[in-house]
Image (cartoon, rainbow, N blue to C red):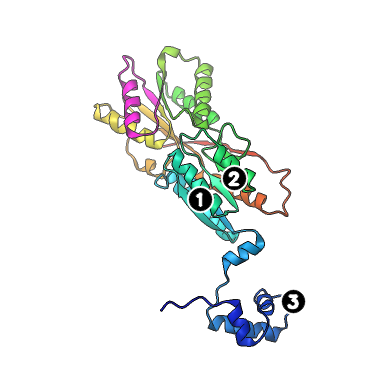
Amino acid sequence: MIQKPATIKEIAKRLNVSISTVSRALHDHPGIGLRTKMRVQQIAAELNYVPNQAAISFKQGKTKTVGVILPNFNEDFFSIAITAIEDMTQSNGYTVLIGQSHDNTEREKTIVATMQKHRVDGVLVSLSKNTTDFTPFEQLMANGIPVVFFDRIPNQLDAYTVSCDLSKATEQLVDLLVAQKHKRIGFINGPESMASFKEREEGFRESVKKHKLNEKDITVVSTDLTKEQTTTAIKQLLDKKDRPTAVIAFNDYVALEAIKFTREQGLKINEDISFVSYANLPITTYLEQGLLASVEQFPYEQAEKATEILFTILDEKEDTSALQKNYVFQAEVVTH
């Protein structure tokens, strides 16, 4: 038979004292004598008493839980990010409730509803690649649940965000390729719904203009980040009469798919064609004849900063008036 957890009421009955006395003794209240405290703690230990967190949360008006919504834990970026979040929440006495959207907007909405139902104190989000309706997040904030976005952030919502400057990083990638004598450059961008799509596009166009590259030698295609569309995108570039000698890919996963397809066509990487990308995944450093460079986007630091901002908002004693609304890290191009 499963034994029910011990309660404060049982401890009080054993010691023939009031429930409030037991409660104050367990919380080390200065109004309770040392002898009583020791007796209460002894009986609590004998009964394996564990505080009822739900009751405590109800009394405090907080669940000490942070909701986290990420696209996919299989990606190194997000697995590193969740490590940072767990490190921060644990040190602050919080637990995390995690949901994966798998880049599905309906699933993302369902997770948001679940977070609200479980009365999380705040939510950390990296958006699905197709999210354009931010109403669910607006409803969270309207109900007093603060939301902080990081990496994949909304482009049309007044919210706290943490991201990297991918426009400047894209300029630096083009600078690197031009320095290596590349003039015909292809660019595989991502879904237009993502804020980073526009950032990359602007940085790319600005750098092309700066270096006075011929527009005929510049080709921009896009992918929805699936293997199929990425293959279609790289095929478009390789089928050009004057194919690019270098390609900028939306992220390292897109780059790896593009490199695989390119090799299958009999072309040599970094001889016939070179690739640069974003994310700087650890695995890319082990590739022979792989990426020339990748943009470090600091997943741990981004998630850590987002969590720090959320806790500042949750701490009612903190003054949030000076809190930076949109925090931007300077991305770093790492050559391989």
Start and end of the magenta stretch? 221-247
The picture quadrant where one finds residue 31 is bottom right
Label 1 crowd (10 A; few <14 / some 14-19 / many >=20): some
Mark nearer the viewer, 1 or 3 = 1
The image quadrant where one finds the C terminus is top left
Q: Which residue, given by chain and number where applicable, does mark 3 sit on? A: 30
Q: Please tell me whether mark 3 sits on a helix, a strand or a loop.
A: loop
Q: Is residue 161 magenta?
A: no
Quadrant of the drawing holding the N terminus = bottom left
- Which residue is label 1 attached to? 114
Residue 273 can be seen, yes or no: no
Disc 3 marks a residue whose amino acid type is Pro
Of residue 159 and residue 87, the one placed in the foreground of this image is: 159
Amino acid on which the number 2 mark rests in the picture: Leu
Provide residue 62's location: percent of width, then percent of height: 63, 58
Q: How many discs mark residues in the rendered view?
A: 3
**Circle 2 sits in a helix, a strand or a loop, which is it?**
helix
Question: What amino acid type is highlighted by mark number 1?
Answer: Thr
- Towards the viewer: 308 or 216: 308
Q: Please provide percent x and percent y for residue 100.
A: 44, 47
Using the image, tell me which numbered label, if any, was put on residue 13: none
Q: Which residue is mark 2?
A: 140
Going from N to C along the chain, the mark reached first, 2 or 3, is 3
- The tag earlier along the polypeptide, 1 or 3, is 3
- Vertical placement of 185 versus 131: above or below? above
